[in-house]
Amino acid sequence: MKILFIIDTLEIGGAEKSILDMASRLKSAKPVIVVLYRGLRLLPEYERAGLRVITLNLPGKYNFIKAIKAFTKIVKTERPDLVHATLFRSEIVARIGLRNSSIPLISSFVSDSYSAERYGKLSVAGRLKLDLVKWIDGVTAQWSTHFVSISRSIVSVNCKALKISPNRVTVIYRGRDVSLAYSISEARRNQLAQQFGGNVTFFSVGRLLVLKGFLESIEAFSKVIKLHPEARYLIAGEGHDRTLFQMAIDKYGLNGKVFLLGTRNDIPELLAYSDVFVFPSHYEGLGGALVEAMLATKPIVASDIEVIAEFFVHGKTGLLFQLKNPDDLAKKMVWMIEHPEEAKAMGIRARETAVQRFNIENVVRQHEELYARILKEKKKTR
């Protein structure tokens, strides 16, 4: 069977990496990747994996009319058996483009897009805009054949927002290559140690957005460093709230102690170099960076939100802190420094959990089974 995967861009992100890992391992399906808009940072990795990629390179943020026309033309040429769309813009394009087609369409739940937490952070204008997005999403969602959610926790909120039945949703976790070695050479370790200094390193990965919780983690670290001045905090990622985080670093006098690293392509090395992984996000679809930290056997401090508690056990695979509470986060970070053996044991158990739940081979098999089932059901309705 030929599966057409459609996605907004190939910038570095959880959805883009997950499609790369999964599509490149399909055994019973032939994948074709359609990328709508500009942003192709991961294209070389897709090509190295042997994936065929069609890039439209459309300008602008939406440009839906051109995108839909181009997509329908590709569908006529490629004649896929099934289309799998990921992220809002691609889903809208695919739903409208396949509206009068018999080709099954799978849409994806990859985040808690319409959570109360997200609404609470928006201005009046922002809430109105999100309401419009939700209305468009809800209307066109009815045209999707089925949905895949990357966690159980986000199913109910999204189904309620889009007015669709949970029976139309299959939960398949995002997968990771559990054989990947999170290692670092001694020379590279020495280089990073010279660059950042200190002897205890906390590490976070995520877009630089307020909802990722970095304002709280920076404030928490300002308390940690008073007890452990040798500590350092590295944050990898980029985003439009960078200025706010830099202002927080300046406010607490943490320049040279907290480092905003920007977008990086050496995350496995940075994980291997770090001592403790911090995941302070306010809401998530799953948290791919957290899964990678678990696979890297890192002691973890994470926010106590439903999606993380779905597979993360406080006191066993790491420590959970009260959401948006810098004092509690600081307390947990200090505990990790002062209890290295217990922290190391948590990291080992975290990896065991991640290997069981997020093995990419199992995830690929589950997708192939879902695609086959959807196509079989389509034949029955003919």
Image (tube, rainbow, N blue to C red):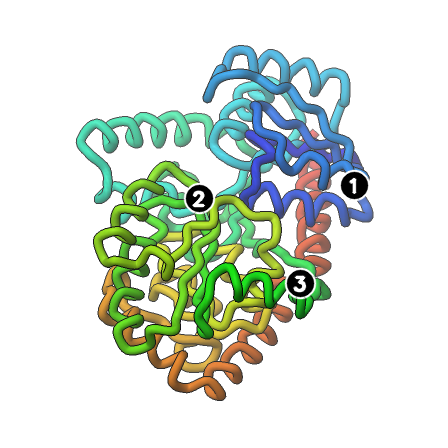
Give whichever of 314, 108 is nearer the camera: 314
Q: Which residue is mark 1?
A: 48
Placement of the C terminus among the 4 image quadrants: top right
- Image coordinates for residue 94, horizontal then vertical, percent: 57, 25
> Residue drawn at (46%, 21%), measured in percent from left and top?
61
How many angstroms separate mark 3 from mark 2 (CA)?
28 Å
In this rendering, which labeled residue sits more in front, label 2 or label 1?
1
> Residue drawn at (35%, 81%), measured in percent from left and top?
335
| Image position of 4 with respect to 276: above or below | above
Of the two numbered discs 3 and 1 on the same chain, state the one appearing first in sequence: 1
- Image coordinates for residue 187, horizontal then vertical, percent: 67, 66
Give whichever of 337, 88 is nearer the camera: 337
Q: Amino acid at mark 3?
A: Asn
Do the CB atoms of the residues marked 3 and 1 lie less than 8 Å apart? no
Of the two numbered discs 2 and 1 on the same chain, state the one appearing first in sequence: 1
Q: Which residue is mark 3?
A: 359
- Image coordinates for residue 23, horizontal then vertical, percent: 72, 44
In this rendering, which labeled residue sits more in front, label 3 or label 1?
1
Placement of the N terminus among the 4 image quadrants: top right
Do the CB atoms of the residues marked 2 and 1 lie less than 8 Å apart? no
| Image position of 43 with respect to 202: above or below | above
How many angstroms separate mark 3 from mark 1 (CA)?
21 Å
Which numbered dot is residue 165?
Answer: 2
Give whichever of 326, 221 is nearer the camera: 221
Q: Is residue 36 left or right of residue 33?
A: left
Q: Residues within 10 Å of mark 3 (few under 14, many from 20)?
A: some
The kind of secondary structure element at disc 1 is helix
Q: Amino acid at mark 2?
A: Ser
